[in-house]
Image (cartoon, rainbow, N blue to C red):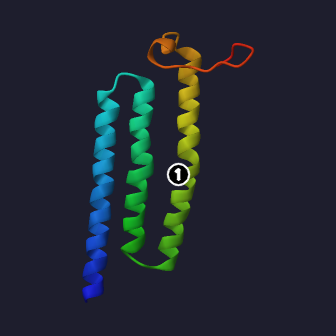
Amino acid sequence: MIFQWLRFALCAILMLVGLVAFFASAFGVNKFDFVMNRLHAAGIADTLGLICILLSLIIAPGTLSSTLKLVLVGLLMGIASPIGTHLLSRIEVATNDKLREHCKLEEDENGNI
């Protein structure tokens, strides 16, 4: 009985931390004007929020099949999210002419960013 209440409390705390991270990320995406800042705010939800919510869902039922499925979802999101964020930032670097006013860009010997 005590173990079930402890598991419930841990799941509830992790779920609340994940939800706070998602709300902070949504606020940051809507507040910031610069695309790179928005990407950073969205990355918070991908990392902290997703990890906390997935851990909460893994702990809640405690079955092996659901745990393996949720771990697979976490791995796929862990692979796909940084790739998508990197592609979006490269598009911003390639298309925004005023980017040098906002941040320092490193160039190679050919002048490419």
Judge whether 49 appears above or below 43 on screen: below
Judge whether 8 appears above or below 48 on screen: below
- Observer-nearest residue: 97 or 111? 111
**Which residue is identified by label 1?**
77
> Is 27 left, or right, of 85 in this rendering?
left
Q: In the image, residue 55 lies at what x, y percent?
A: 41, 65
Please report the residue visible at 74 percent of the width from the left and 16 percent of the height from the top.
109
Give the residue type that dot 1 points to.
Met
* Secondary structure found at label 1: helix
**Badge count:** 1
Judge whether 87 appears above or below 61 on screen: above
Judge whether 62 appears above or below 98 on screen: below
Residue 32, picture quadrant = top left
Q: In the image, residue 17 lies at what x, y percent?
A: 30, 56
The N terminus appears in which quarter of the rendering?
A: bottom left
Is disc 1 surrounded by few (<14), some (14 to 19) or many (20+) residues within 10 Å?
some
Residue 28, picture quadrant = top left
Q: In the image, residue 34 lies at what x, y percent?
A: 40, 22
Please report the residue visible at 68 percent of the width from the left and 16 percent of the height from the top.
112
Residue 84, picture quadrant = top right
